[in-house]
């Protein structure tokens, strides 16, 4: 898995390339944790999943942990950007879509983050 991050306003955009599974979940957790630790001003996490073809339960757990960190520690939102149909299905079946939003474009994701509204 390849990970890239950039900050836009109070949002951290993390771009993932490759499978988010047992083999990459810990690297994902550590990467996001490090990025969040670099700035207290980050409130929202946008996960760019456009280049993620597969996610398993380890990946779901890693995302859920980041949700808790963003929600409880920063009172922010978690937004998935452009997940492919198989990934979207896993997110839906796992219940993650009850706590995160889906955006189709980066502009839409940033607008959602700026709104700051989300069902707890």
Image (cartoon, rainbow, N blue to C red):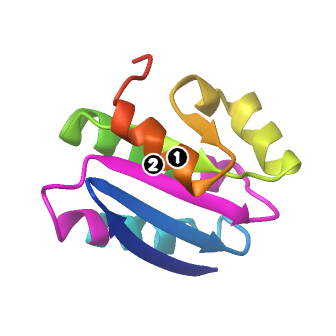
Q: Is residue 62 left or right of residue 48?
A: left
* Residue drawn at (65%, 65%) of the image: 22
* Residue drawn at (46%, 36%) of the image: 112
The percent position of residue 7, horizontal first and vertical second, equals 33, 67
- In magenta, the rendered stretch is 35-61
Q: Quadrant of the C terminus?
A: top left
Q: Secondary structure at mark 2?
A: helix
Q: Quadrant of the N terminus?
A: bottom right
Mark 2 touches mark 1? (CB < 8 Å): yes
Q: Which mark is residue 110?
A: 2
In the rendered image, which residue does mark 1 sit on?
A: 109
The percent position of residue 52, horizontal first and vertical second, equals 74, 65
| Residue 61 visible from this viewpoint | no
Q: Residue furthest top?
A: 119
- The 10 Å Cα crowd at callout 1, few under 14, some 14 to 19, many 20 or more, is many
The percent position of residue 38, horizontal first and vertical second, equals 18, 71
Q: Which of these two is toward me, 69 or 110? A: 110
Q: Secondary structure at mark 1?
A: helix
The percent position of residue 63, horizontal first and vertical second, equals 52, 49
* Residue drawn at (27%, 58%) of the image: 9
Q: Which of these two is toward me, 107 or 118? A: 107
* Residue drawn at (16%, 65%) of the image: 39
Q: Quick check: is 55 in the magenta stretch?
A: yes
Picture layout, residue 104 above or below residue 14: above
Q: Residue furthest bottom?
A: 2
| Label total for image | 2
């Amino acid at each position: 898995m390849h990970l890239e991050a950039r900050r836009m306003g109070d949002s951290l955009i993390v771009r993932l390339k490759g499978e988010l599974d047992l083999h990459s979940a810990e690297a994902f957790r550590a990467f996001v944790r490090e990025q969040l630790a670099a700035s207290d001003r980050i409130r929202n996490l946008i996960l760019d999943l456009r280049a993620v073809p597969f996610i398993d339960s380890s990946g779901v757990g890693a995302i859920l942990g980041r949700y808790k960190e963003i929600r409880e520690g920063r009172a922010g939102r978690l937004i998935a950007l452009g997940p492919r149909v198989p990934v979207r299905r896993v997110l839906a079946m796992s219940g993650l879509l009850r706590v995160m939003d889906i955006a189709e474009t980066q502009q839409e994701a940033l607008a959602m983050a700026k709104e700051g509204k989300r069902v707890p």
